[in-house]
Each structure stands twice: as C-alpha cells, then as structure tokens.
Image: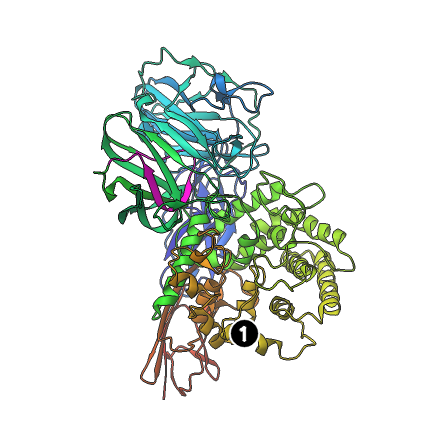
C-alpha cells in the first residue's frame, strides 16, 4: 500500500546535510490516505530517533523531525497510512545517511601544479595522478569514501572506479562551495593493503589561455587538487579513517593536456598499468603538495550526478572528398566520442567533433556554431584499446578522425551520451509522425544541455544561462524528475547573487558579461520563479523557505532600478524575428512576473505583510505597463500584454495572433514564445497552434525536422543556418504537447498535482495521443483516440489525487462515463484515483 519512500526526492541517499530533510512516499492501488504514522531509528524498524504517532491528514510529504544524526550516521525510516479500511502494514524501511561533520583530510595536489600566486602553474604539463595506500587489519562491514576534486576528478579504490558518475564535481562557485560525493566502497576493500587513486583534470575551474584551440573565456577559480576521506567500520565494532595528506604520492599521467573548451590530448603509451592498485611501484613518484586550503567550502552533492545514459554506435563511416574518415552517430548529442581500435603503438589520431558537415564532407566548426578549433588527440598504445576523454565533453553528431587507417570501420567510434541522471518520467506520442519528431528533437536538446546546470549549448559556451531554467521549466519537468536537481540548481543561482541583489544572467558566474548580458529580469528572475515552480509541481516548500530572502532581495533590486515601475534595460525578446518589440516592454513584463510570483510565494508561506506589499507592487507594474505600452503592436508586445491579463486598447489582438500563428507567421523570440502557447492554449485556440505545429515552412519546428535536425537548434532556420544545433531555448511547444494535446494540467490552487484537470484538445486531423508524466503521488496518464464518429478517452489518476475530466466538444453529444464519475458540467466529470474510460459518440 505504501511505496517509493524517498528522502530529499532521492532513494536512500548518502551524505544528506539537511537537519530536517523532506520525507515522501506514494500509495498503491486506489486507496485514499486519511492519516499517516512515521517512525525513524538507528536500525530498521526502530523508533529511537523519531515517532510522529498517528497523524490525521493526507500529507505524503513531511519533514524529518527527529534528533539530527551525527556525521555519517544512518537513519532508517518507515511509514504506515490509514485509509477508509484502517491502518496499513508498515512499509519496508528506507534510509538516508548524514554527511560529514568533520574533515580530517587535507587538500593535495601534484607539486608542479602548485605555485603560490601563479594561477598558471602546471600548464603545459601532463595531468596529475595521486595515490595513497593503507592497511586494513580487520574485516570491514561498512566503508564510505567522501571525495572531491577540482576541476574534474576520477576516483578509484584498488584499481576500480568508485562510481559510474562522471565529470565530477558539478558546477559551483568553487571559491564558495565545492560539492563532494559519498560512495559506498565496502565491496571494493579487502583485508591487508589497499589503495585510493585520484586522477585530476582542470575542468571549468581552471580554464587556462592558449593559442591553438577555442576558449569561451579563460580564468582560474582553482588549480587541480583533490581531497578524500575513507571512513570504515570493522566487524569488531571499531572504526578507522584514512585520508589525503602527507604520505600520498603524485606523478604525471597519460593525459597530457585537457581544456574544458578546446580539447583533450591523451598518449596511451604513457599509461601506468595498476597505478592505483596496492603494491604498485611508485618509487619514481614524488610526495604530494599538501595545501592549506579550507575544508569549510565542502558541501555534499544533493542531486543525481552526470552519467553515461546512452551508447550510440556510429551508424556509418563516411569519407570526405579528400579521404578523411568521418563517423556519424545518427543524432546530435553531448558527451564523449569513444574510440575502440586494434593498432600498433605510436599512431597519432586527431578527433574533430561537430554538428554539421560542409559540402566536401568535412566537419564544420565555427564560432557561432560550436566554437573553433576544438579537437581531441590520441596516441595509440599497442594492441586492442579503448579511449574517450575523461575530463571534458563535446557536442557532436559527426567525429572526423584524422590519421585513422583505412581498414577501421564504423565500429571504431561510439558516442557515449552524458547528462545529469534525472529519472525520465514523461511519455508523449501522437498519430502524427512530424509532431513526434518535434518532441524528439526538443527532448534530445534538453538531454544535451542537462548537465550539472542547464546549459545553453554543449560546445561553444557550456554556461548556465538562466532564462531557460524557468521559462521552460515544464518542458524539462514533464519529461524528467528534477525535484532534487532544481533545488541544487537554486543553490548555485543564489551563490551568484551579488550584495546589492543582482542575479546575473549566468550561474555560476564564471565570467562577468557586460550590461544586459549580465542583468536582465527574464534571466535573473529564475531565482524567484524556480522556488515557486517547485512548490507548484512537487508540493515542496523547501526552496521557497530556503531562498526567500534572496528572492525578496532580487525583486527589491529590480524595484530600485525601475523608473515609475518600468525597467528600461535588458536583452529584449531574445532571438525574435521582429525587432520592433521595445526592450523596456519585455523587461517590465519580466519584472512584473517576478513581483507577482513573490506575492504568491509570500502568501504560500503565510508572510501576509510581504504578500500585501508585493501584490501592490505587481498591480502597480501592470498599471504602468498598460499606460506606457498600450500602443505597441508587435506580436510579442500583444502576447505579453495578454499574458499579464491586460485587455489591449487595440481590439482583436487574440484573433490577430491566432491567425498569424495559424499561417506560420510567428515573429516572437524565446521570452514571448512560452507565453504565446500559454495565452493561446488558455483561450482554446488549439487549432491555430496545431497548424503551426504541423507546418514545415520557415519559421517552424517542422522546418527544422524536414531539414535534418536531430536536436532542437538555436534558431528557427535549424540546420540551414550556422548556429548551434543543440539548443532547447525554443522548445516551449513541448509544454503545450502535454497540456494542450495530452490535456494534463493542474487545477488552480492545487500543488503537487493533488487536483488534476484533464482537458485534451483534438485539433485538425490528429487521431490519437498518449501522454503521461510523474506527480508526487504517482503517474498520471492520458490516452485518447477518435475514429468513425467516436472519441475514446482513458485517464489514469494516481492514488492521492483526484481529477476533473473535460471532454472536447467535437460535435459528439452522446457521452459515456464510469458509474463513479460525478457530472461537473456539460462535458465534465469528477473522478477519484483510478483508471477511467470516457466515450463520446454521435
């Protein structure tokens, strides 16, 4: 009856640092919860840490209220619930482990990578390998390795990687916070000699200047270094700790250079077999440099890491007109190009990744697409061998491999697709192949930019531009569980906030841009919007409470910059086709949205005085907006005006926009585009949106698909224009796919999809749709089809939720509904949790 117990929206997480982490669960079957009882203890089934007693209510998300566990301690918790038939059995126990409460480990590095006052120390030298050995005299029953490194590290115990997570640690402001990970390494240890190894690369923490390859910027937050702490418990009840510090040794590894943007160079002839195994010959290694750097910045990572999530073997080996072999993996992706070869030692290979090919069949690289030049190099060892970069990644579909012998076939290259390992939760499929392809390319672009932050593109920038994080929140969240991911993202955004309240357009702010590229409310407003979106989607108040002061400071910062409630600066409706939309109009709309969300947030947290103040501020902005911009007639101007709830003085705006969209005449940019789908969807103009969705003329999504896009591109022109081929910022239509065509929505005032609205549209010649996504209570699924004068709708409502189901008006007046459904309108029915079928016919 009770299932899917999670802590901080993660399953049995290690390293939790919150003293009161949120605990959640789901129900099975069609039961409705009327009460709950949670127990937590130091062992399974115990309640020596916390016992709520029997609590009346339907809450399936509560905060842990027991005694805070000490560093590394495990808390086991379970729950039972009461429904109409009484109390359930206790659930199986879930657990979470606390993070480190003290660090005895020290930061260490290779001596050649440390020179006080010289941020370029180590440049031009191979990347470091660090290793330490220790003896375990007794059998181990539990072992945890806490480890961090800058800029990228790969950790191993006794020659085996401790995790399948890659590109660790995630982006943060490394001067303020470094995320460490906790790994269960019990099975990797043995009695006697053991070894821990750490391979280091510079990552984005140390982007050094160079002349031969592309770089978005250069600058150093920290040179490569590592810290690791192994905590073990023995079978006899004693414990031990081994950590980085004096006694560790360092040498140079086979990766001779790595640059976050420009490429990675690896000489396999320099590999040291067994370097991280106990008993290895390290007589030529040097003592590490032990740093005085603080451990106060170490914080446990609290969201899924980046992992290899797909393997795409090359679909073809192409040959350019000059004979250069080019491998096609079939889709634009982000990750690693892996070589698998059997060659003699000493062959030099140069791998050039890219999204497009030129007329001669060679990979295209240029500044507005991928940045240029970007390449990885590999020098072979003798015999069968496999290699991919370890310390950086690329965006690509094609990999040009210079220096490869002719006999190598397509099997020589495989794409290892990387992304933050947020659980996929959405499905969307229709009877229209073009619409399915549009959903696919949007999802591929989301995956290509879902790294430790949501990036804009995986090649030339790799930066966390913030407008997408909230404008396209539903596009991401319909398809992936991002509850923990977005909470962690918010910590990074809050760290970037300046003392005067400004939130820059990128976070972390690895470089400071000029003017509007640093300060635009439709970018910085993410710090206000995301906590509210997390609350609405997941019923989670944690982010609103944690970041409330930062949210308030940002809105007050905007108020301080406004002139009579109008903001006169910003980037405008970025990448729009119509240049007539005034920048102040777009910025003021963003200001209003932040103020309005702040008022709603304050209300949800019972901060009544703040709610009243920000509500007045929001109303003042609306009034000033209506007075200042009433005569503006661009498409974006009218859409944003309608989105604010203003009735424009120019009559017929909604009809004008609908006809323009129906005819493929969209001129808006990425800021107004989500509002366009929202405004027309709310107004029931699904026929217009459908005609745009199925258009293949420029500008349209179908134009991109028909011209070969395999991921959403930066501009409407898609593959016919030299911009990035892996951007998701124009992907707003995917939210309408779920909400409009799938009909999956949430009732006003509901949070966490406790109260669903299921209202699918069936425009044009669309014959069927299947859509589903996850809610805190389980999956909601909608499936409909129409044929020969009937419309059949199937709805799955998760336990703990209820739904109002609204059938579309297709001229079919004979309605059939389940016996348990309660009529709520001419074509609407109320249903509880369960699976329900509705039919309309002539």
Tell me, yes or no, if residue 530 can be seen here: yes
Q: Mark 1 points at which residue?
A: 660
| Residue 284 screen position, x and y as percent | 37, 11
Range covered by the magenta-colored residues: 387-405
Q: Quadrant of residue 763?
A: bottom left
Q: Quadrant of the N terminus?
A: bottom left
Q: Residue furthest front?
A: 322
Q: Residues within 10 Å of mark 1 (few under 14, many from 20)?
A: some
- Give the image location of residue 730, x and y in percent: 50, 59
Residue 538 location, x and y as percent? 50, 56
Secondary structure under the numbered disc 1 in the rendered image: helix
Most foreground residue, 621 or 295: 621
Is residue 783 highlighted in magenta? no
Is 662 left or right of 433, judged from the image as shown? right
Dividing the picture into quarters, in which one does residue 630 lie?
bottom right
* Relative horizontal placement of residue 32, taking residue 338 as reference (left or right): right
Q: Is residue 363 left or right of residue 600?
A: left
Residue furthest out toward the top: 283
Q: In this view, does 366 lie above or below 345?
A: below
User: Is 704 drawn above or below residue 248 in the view shown?
Assistant: below
Residue 81 seen in the figure:
no
Identified at 52% across, 76% down, the residue is 684
Q: Which of 449 and 51 is in front in this view?
A: 449
């Amino acid at each position: 009856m009770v299932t899917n117990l999670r802590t901080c929206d993660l399953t049995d997480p290690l390293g939790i640092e919150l003293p009161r982490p949120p605990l959640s669960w789901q129900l099975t079957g069609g039961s409705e919860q009327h009460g709950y009882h949670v127990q937590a203890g130091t062992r399974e089934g115990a309640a020596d840490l916390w016992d709520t007693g029997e609590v009346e209510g339907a809450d399936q998300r509560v905060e842990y209220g027991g005694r805070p566990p000490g560093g590394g301690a495990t808390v086991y918790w379970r729950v039972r619930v009461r429904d109409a038939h009484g109390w359930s059995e206790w659930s199986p126990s879930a657990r979470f482990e606390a993070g480190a409460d003290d660090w005895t480990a020290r930061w260490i590095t290779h001596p050649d990578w440390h020179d006080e006052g010289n941020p370029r120390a180590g440049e031009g030298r191979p990347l470091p390998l660090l290793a330490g050995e220790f003896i375990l005299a007794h059998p181990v029953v539990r072992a945890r390795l806490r480890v961090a490194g800058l800029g990228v590290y790969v950790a191993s115990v006794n020659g085996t990687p401790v995790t399948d997570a890659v590109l660790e640690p995630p982006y943060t402001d490394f001067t303020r916070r470094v995320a460490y990970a906790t790994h269960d390494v019990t099975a990797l240890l043995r009695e006697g000699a053991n070894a821990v190894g750490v391979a280091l690369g510079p990552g984005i923490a140390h982007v050094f200047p160079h002349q031969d390859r592309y770089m978005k910027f250069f600058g150093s937050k920290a040179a490569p270094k590592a810290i690791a702490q192994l905590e073990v418990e023995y079978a006899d009840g004693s414990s031990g700790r081994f950590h980085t510090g004096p006694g560790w040794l360092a040498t140079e590894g086979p990766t001779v250079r790595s640059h976050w943007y420009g490429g990675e160079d690896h000489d396999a002839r320099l590999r040291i077999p067994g370097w991280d195994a106990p008993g290895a010959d390290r007589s030529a290694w040097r003592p590490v440099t032990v740093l005085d750097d603080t451990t106060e910045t170490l914080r446990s990572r609290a969201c899924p890491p980046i992992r290899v999530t797909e393997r795409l073997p090359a679909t073809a080996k192409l040959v350019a007109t000059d004979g250069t072999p080019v491998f096609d993996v079939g889709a634009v992706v982000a990750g690693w190009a892996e070589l698998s070869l059997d060659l003699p030692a000493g062959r030099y290979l140069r791998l050039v990744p890219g999204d497009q090919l030129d007329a001669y069949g060679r990979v295209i690289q240029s500044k507005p697409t991928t940045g240029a030049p970007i390449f990885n190099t590999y020098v072979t060892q003798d015999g069968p061998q496999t290699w991919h970069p370890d310390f950086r990644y690329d965006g690509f579909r094609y990999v040009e491999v210079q220096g490869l012998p002719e006999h190598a076939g397509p099997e020589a290259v495989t794409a290892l697709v990387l992304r933050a390992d947020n659980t996929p939760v959405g499905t969307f499929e229709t009877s229209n192949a073009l619409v399915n392809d549009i959903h696919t390319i949007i999802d591929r672009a989301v995956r290509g930019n879902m790294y430790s932050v949501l990036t804009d593109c995986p090649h030339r920038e790799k930066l966390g531009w913030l407008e997408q994080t909230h404008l396209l929140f539903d596009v991401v969240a319909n398809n992936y569980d991002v509850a923990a991911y977005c909470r962690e993202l918010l910590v990074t955004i809050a760290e970037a906030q300046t003392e005067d309240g400004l939130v820059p357009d990128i976070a972390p702010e690895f470089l400071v841009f000029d003017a509007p590229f640093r300060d635009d409310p439709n970018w910085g407003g993410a710090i206000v919007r995301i906590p509210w979106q997390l609350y609405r989607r997941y019923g989670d108040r944690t982010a609103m409470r944690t970041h409330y002061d930062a949210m308030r400071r940002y809105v007050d910062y905007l108020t301080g910059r406004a002139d009579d409630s109008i903001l006169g600066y910003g980037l405008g409706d970025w990448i729009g086709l119509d240049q007539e939309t005034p920048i102040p109009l777009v910025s003021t709309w963003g200001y209003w949205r932040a103020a309005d969300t702040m008022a709603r947030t304050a209300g949800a947290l019972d901060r009544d005085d703040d709610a009243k103040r920000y509500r007045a501020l929001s109303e003042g902005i609306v009034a000033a907006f209506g007075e200042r911009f009433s005569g503006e007639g661009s498409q974006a101007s009218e859409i944003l005006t309608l989105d604010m709830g203003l009735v424009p003085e120019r009559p017929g705006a909604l009809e004008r926009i609908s006809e323009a969209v129906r005819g493929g005449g969209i001129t808006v940019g990425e800021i107004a585009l989500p509002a366009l789908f929202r405004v027309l969807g709310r107004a029931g103009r699904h026929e217009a949106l459908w005609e745009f969705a199925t258009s293949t003329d420029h500008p349209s999504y179908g134009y991109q698909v028909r011209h070969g896009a395999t991921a959403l591109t930066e501009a409407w022109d898609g593959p016919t224009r030299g911009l990035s081929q892996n951007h998701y910022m124009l992907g707003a239509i995917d939210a309408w796919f779920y909400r409009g065509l799938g009909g999956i929505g949430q009732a006003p005032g509901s949070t966490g999809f406790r109260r669903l609205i299921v209202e699918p549209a069936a425009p044009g010649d669309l014959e069927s749709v299947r859509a589903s996504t996850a809610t805190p209570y389980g999956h909601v699924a909608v499936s409909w089809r129409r044929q020969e004068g009937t419309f059949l709708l199937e709805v799955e409502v998760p336990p703990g939720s209820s739904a109002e189901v609204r059938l579309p008006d297709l001229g079919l007046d004979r309605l059939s509904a389940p016996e348990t459904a309660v009529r709520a309108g001419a074509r609407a029915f109320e249903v509880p949790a369960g699976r329900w079928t509705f039919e309309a016919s002539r």
